[in-house]
Image: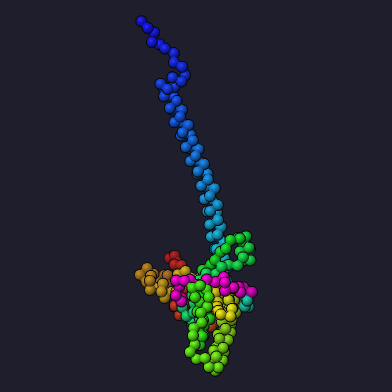
Amino acid sequence: MPNTNLCLDKTKYELISGAAATRTRNRMLLGSSLGLFGIFLLALLIVIPCFHYKAKRRKIREALKSVYTNKAAPDMKSQAASREPNMGRLEIINSDDLQFDESSTPLGTGAFGAVYRGKWRVPKRILAEYNWPRSTDLDVAIKVLTSPGDPVRGTASGRAVTAENSDTSPEAKVMERITKENNLNEMLSEAKVMASVSHLNCLPLIGVCLTKNMQCMVSAFVELGSMDRYLRENKDSLNSYTLLSWAEQIADGMAYLEARGIIHRSVQIVSLPPTPLPRAP
């Protein structure tokens, strides 16, 4: 009877037992795992700097907002009413650094100007104080000086447009120039007053832009808009505690202005920005 107990060499044994296929599969799994791990590390190397950049940019923007808004300002109870105007706080803004919102209609009109939404490109010298080399902008409200004879309005591109004047007589031109000069002096007087204001419930002025074609004042943009519109749109969700809190803040700001001898000539609900909703006690 022939002997069937044959000795197989290593190659035939691995082929019959499946060891070669198992080894190949393990190599493929190991290679795939290493590839996925490499992709994961590469993604981390890309994502982590992006998150760090966004976090730092957000921190810089918040720091700038605290400087150019009233977030860090004291309230009536924690500061003296007497404070000299500090024109050094105001920025002399280049018109090239202002960009009007293309979709923005005037946010409001005042005694000698219209207010538009826009963006202010923060100068590099200011960003250098925060060790931030990249360009950064802030949402702002731009109050453009106008006059009855020759209204100047900011356009979407940031330039100024002069309306046509049907009366070109010398007398009309003289009156027009006088009106413009008076309005400019009033605007500078208002800027001087606002430079002295530092209160939690009073929006400060960032700076002024004075060029041949456009004169304007720039302040921080209030995201929630005017209070009259906010009240109309959210009348069903506002409670008495919120309304009383807003009334207290308005009174606190007005008391501060009165203590400093400042008269607000246009106190109306349309010019009051709402604050974030307070929590009920």
Q: Is residue 277 visible?
A: yes
Q: Tell me if residue 201 comes above or below residue 182 in the rendering.
A: above
Measured as percent of width and height from the top left, residue 210 is found at 59, 78
Q: Is residue 101 magenta?
A: yes
Q: Nearer the viewer, residue 33 or 244?
A: 33
What residue sits 47% from the left and 71% below the top?
102
What residue sits 53% from the left and 45% below the top?
42
Q: Exactly how many numbered labels are in the figure? A: 0
What residue sits 47% from the left and 73% below the top?
273
Q: Which residues are magenta?
A: 88-107
Q: Tell me if residue 51 comes above or below residue 178 in the rendering.
A: above
Q: Nearer the viewer, residue 164 or 48?
A: 164
Measured as percent of width and height from the top left, residue 215 is found at 56, 79
Q: Is residue 264 magenta?
A: no
Q: Tell me if residue 8 comes above or below residue 126 in the rendering.
A: above
Which coloring applies here? Answer: rainbow
Q: Quadrant of the N terminus?
A: top left
Measured as percent of width and height from the top left, residue 31 is found at 49, 35
Q: Quadrant of the C terminus?
A: bottom left
Q: Tell me if residue 278 comes above or below residue 41 in the rendering.
A: below
Measured as percent of width and height from the top left, residue 4 is found at 38, 10
The image quadrant of residue 258 is bottom right
Q: Nearer the viewer, residue 45 or 87?
A: 45
What residue sits 52% from the left and 73% below the top?
158
Residue placed furthest toward the top = 1
Q: Is residue 175 visible?
A: no
